[in-house]
């Protein structure tokens, strides 16, 4: 892959992956914030299972999205200062790091705590490390603080998209929306 696409829009596959991941990440972050302070109960255990399922789903979608992105060039960027283009490039790279690091740290935390991860309640995943309370503490902290950082990044991403849309209407947000929405 080289350069950028001649279309002003991302591919439909890239758009679907973006929005499904965005909704999944929002749900996983909200669920994580809500469940962490609950007393132990069947509800809390169910929320932890759903949170893990979302994390594994996000990991899988991120892998698909990365492969898609390596194969299909993004649309050309609307005109913006060079520093903003660099910030956007590095911000997107950091998003990909987080898409993998957060689910992996959660999986490592579960493994180190001795809690199995069973995707969708059907597919047992292997433990990545042996049970180890010291490691569990480290992976829990990484998972938690990376989650907070991702939440801040998402807010910054949304703010930047809105700012760009206000500065250059019809150029930024429409790139990540299906082109069919704008055909007459």
Image: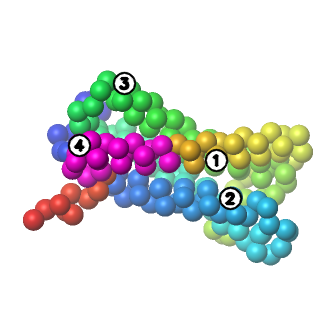
Q: Nearer the viewer, residue 2 or 98?
A: 98
* Alpha-carbon span between mark 4 and mark 2: 36 Å
Secondary structure of the residue carrying numbered label 4: loop
Crowding at dot 3, Cα within 10 Å, few <14 / some 14-19 / many 20+, comes out as few
The Cα atoms of the two marked residues, 3 and 2, are separated by 34 Å
Badges 2 and 1: C-beta atoms under 8 Å apart?
yes
Q: Which residue is mark 4?
A: 168
Q: Which percent across, then down, holds residue 23?
A: 49, 61
Mark 3 and mark 2 in contact? Answer it, CB < 8 Å.
no
Is tag 4's residue or tag 2's residue first in the polypeptide sequence?
A: 2
Residue 158 counted in the magenta span? yes
Q: Please identify the residue farthest to the top as the structure is shown.
A: 82
Q: Quadrant of residue 99 in the image?
A: top right
Instruction: Say which mark, if any, is on residue 83.
Output: 3
Which residue sits at x=18%, y=44%?
A: 7
Which comes sooner in the sequence, label 4 or label 3?
3
Mark 4 or 2, closer to the camera = 4
Query: Residue, x 84% and y 40% (percent of image)?
Result: 135
In the image, the segment drawn in magenta is 154-175
Give how far apart the Cα atoms at labels 1 and 4 are.
Answer: 31 Å
Between 110 and 44, the residue placed more toward the observer is 44
User: Residue 80's mark?
Assistant: none
The dot on residue 147 is 1
Q: Residue at x 37, y 38 (%)?
A: 70
């Amino acid at each position: 892959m080289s350069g950028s696409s001649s279309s002003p829009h991302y591919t439909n596959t890239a758009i679907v992956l973006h929005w499904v991941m965005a909704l999944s990440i929002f749900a996983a972050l909200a669920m994580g914030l809500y469940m962490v302070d609950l007393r132990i109960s069947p509800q809390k255990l169910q929320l932890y299972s759903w949170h893990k399922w979302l994390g594994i789903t996000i990991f899988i979608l991120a892998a698909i999205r990365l492969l898609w992105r390596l194969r299909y060039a993004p649309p050309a960027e609307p005109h913006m200062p060079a520093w903003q283009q660099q910030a956007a490039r590095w911000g997107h790279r950091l998003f990909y790091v987080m898409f993998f690091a957060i689910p992996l740290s959660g999986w490592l935390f579960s493994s180190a705590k001795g809690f199995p991860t069973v995707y969708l309640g059907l597919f047992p995943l292997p433990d990545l490390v042996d049970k180890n309370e010291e490691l569990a503490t480290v992976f829990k902290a990484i998972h938690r603080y990376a989650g907070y950082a991702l939440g801040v990044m998402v807010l910054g991403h949304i703010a930047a998209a809105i700012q760009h849309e206000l500065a250059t209407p019809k150029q930024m947000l429409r790139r990540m929306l299906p082109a069919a929405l704008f055909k007459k």
